[in-house]
Image (tube, helix red, strand yellow):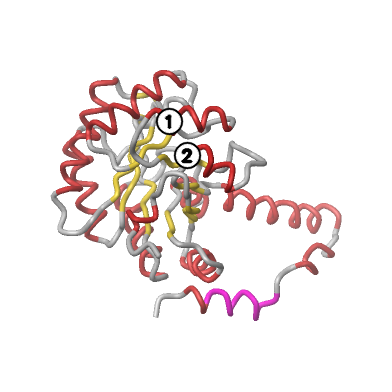
């Protein structure tokens, strides 16, 4: 059995990284068998009534992440956007603060907010180099994930994304991630381009089994906002039926209070 967050990251034997957005969802994931949790910047923003992408401050993200960390015994990774600053020394500080609240790792994007533009190649690599140095200087193990988000935002192509994650690996990243890969061929291409573990987001590669992801070389499958948007979709559909048609019948399919409570109790930190 894996005994650390890092040990879970095995190429060809992926685990599901479950992105929670409050204590309750963290406990539910843990009670249902998740091996590790993560925050989600988008799902967190939804809880505050805000849009995704650059609307959360570092203090807010740290406070939120600390709540998730305290909820269960599972390791937690922080979805920390661009590290909440452009300069490498700000990213270094974000690494140190993340470790202080008990996070097992964080992910860092190569996108500047609020303009949502990719950092130049050299600065993007320098930021990861600084983050890696800070992570390796910590007293506890810390998994740094470097993300090539310009591909997701259609600001550069897959060739450039691969060039960046290869440079991120050389700069010391423990895991790399190219969000919004559209098919298994792209997943295989990314996984074969680096020697470090690769995270794959589930939300855009649809109808693919865990076995297929494993065969493609993935080490980690993150849910991202998928569970949050699924939950909000149910909320939206049922609410529309009630407020527009006066139809409450959909509520009859809900889980019982006892089932939910038992699951949360099973996953809760003791």
Q: Position of residue 249 (x, y in %)?
A: 84, 64
The percent position of residue 162, horizontal first and vertical second, equals 39, 24
Q: What residue lies at 43% left-to-right and 18% top-to-bottom?
A: 159
114 or 11, nearer to the observer: 11
Q: Which mark is residue 103?
A: none
Task: Please give the residue where the numbered disc 1 appears in the rendered image.
Answer: 192
First in residue order: circle 1 vs circle 2: 1
**Label 2 Cα crowd, 10 Å radius (few <14 / some 14-19 / many 20+):** many
Q: Residue at x 23, y 48 (%)?
A: 95
Secondary structure of the magenta portion, mostly? helix
Q: Is residue 86 above or below residue 237?
A: above
Element at badge 1? Answer: helix
Left or right: 172 as drawn, with respect to 115 = left
Marks 1/2 in contact by CB < 8 Å: the verdict is yes
Residue shown at 26% from the left, 37% from the top: 85
Residues shaded magenta: 256-264
Where is mark 2, residue-wise? 217
């Amino acid at each position: 059995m894996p005994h650390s967050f890092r040990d879970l990251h095995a190429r060809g034997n992926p685990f599901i990284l479950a992105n929670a957005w409050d204590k309750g969802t963290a406990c539910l994931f843990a009670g249902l068998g998740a091996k590790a949790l993560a925050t989600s910047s988008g799902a967190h923003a939804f809880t505050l009534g805000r849009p995704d992408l650059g609307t959360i401050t570092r203090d807010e993200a740290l406070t939120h992440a600390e709540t998730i960390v305290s909820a269960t015994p599972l390791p937690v990774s922080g979805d920390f956007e661009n590290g909440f600053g452009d300069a490498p020394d700000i990213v270094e500080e974000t690494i140190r603060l993340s470790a202080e609240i008990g996070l097992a790792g964080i992910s860092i994007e190569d996108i500047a907010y609020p303009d949502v533009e990719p950092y130049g190649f050299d600065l993007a690599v320098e930021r990861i180099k600084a983050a890696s140095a800070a992570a390796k200087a910590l007293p506890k193990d810390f998994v740094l994930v470097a993300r090539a988000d310009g591909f997701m935002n259609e600001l550069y192509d897959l060739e450039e994304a691969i060039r960046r994650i290869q440079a991120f690996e050389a700069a010391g990243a423990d895991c790399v991630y190219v969000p919004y890969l559209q098919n298994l061929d792209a997943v295989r291409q990314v996984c074969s381009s680096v020697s470090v573990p690769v995270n794959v987001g589930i939300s855009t590669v649809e109808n693919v089994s865990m076995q297929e992801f494993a065969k493609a070389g993935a080490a980690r499958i993150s849910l991202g906002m998928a569970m949050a948007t699924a939950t909000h979709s149910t909320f939206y559909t049922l609410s529309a039926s009630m407020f527009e048609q006066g139809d409450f019948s959909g509520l009859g399919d809900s889980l019982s209070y006892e089932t939910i409570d038992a699951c949360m109790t099973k996953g809760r930190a003791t």
